[in-house]
Amino acid sequence: MPVFCGSVSGREREVLQLLAAGWSNLEVADRLYMSKRTVETHRQNLIAQTHSRNTAELIKRAVLEGLIR
């Protein structure tokens, strides 16, 4: 059964891709023209949606399911 049961928005996918590339929340916010708090909210929503314990586990699951490279 897929971990990403709900739909992931394009913006969430962009945030996830940049976090997986090692960017900080502030760097992602600057790159995507959003607040740092919005980036943190997207990350927390994805963690909750996938029942991950932290960002590292979220990224691992996203890579394993082909959501990001």
Image (cartoon, rainbow, N blue to C red):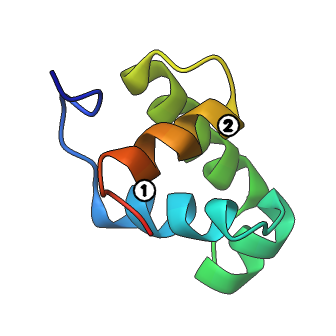
- In the image, 17 versus 25, the foreground residue is 17
Residue type, numbered disc 1: Glu
- In the image, 48 versus 2, the foreground residue is 2
Tag 2's secondary structure?
Answer: helix
Report crowding for label 2: few under 14, some 14 to 19, many 20 or more residues within 10 A (C-alpha): some
Q: Mark 1 points at which residue?
A: 12
Tag shown at residue 56: none
> Which sits earlier in the primary sequence, circle 1 or circle 2?
1
Tag 1's secondary structure?
Answer: helix
Q: Position of residue 3 (x, y in %)?
A: 29, 27
Q: Do the residues labelled 1 and 2 touch (CB within 8 Å)?
A: no
Report crowding for label 1: few under 14, some 14 to 19, many 20 or more residues within 10 A (C-alpha): some
Residue 1 quadrant: top left
Question: As drawn, is 26 to the left or to the right of 47?
Answer: right
Q: Mark 2 points at which residue?
A: 55
The residue drawn where x is 30% and y is 57% is 66
The residue drawn where x is 56% and y is 46% is 59
Q: Where is residue 45 in the image (x, y as percent from the top left)?
A: 48, 32
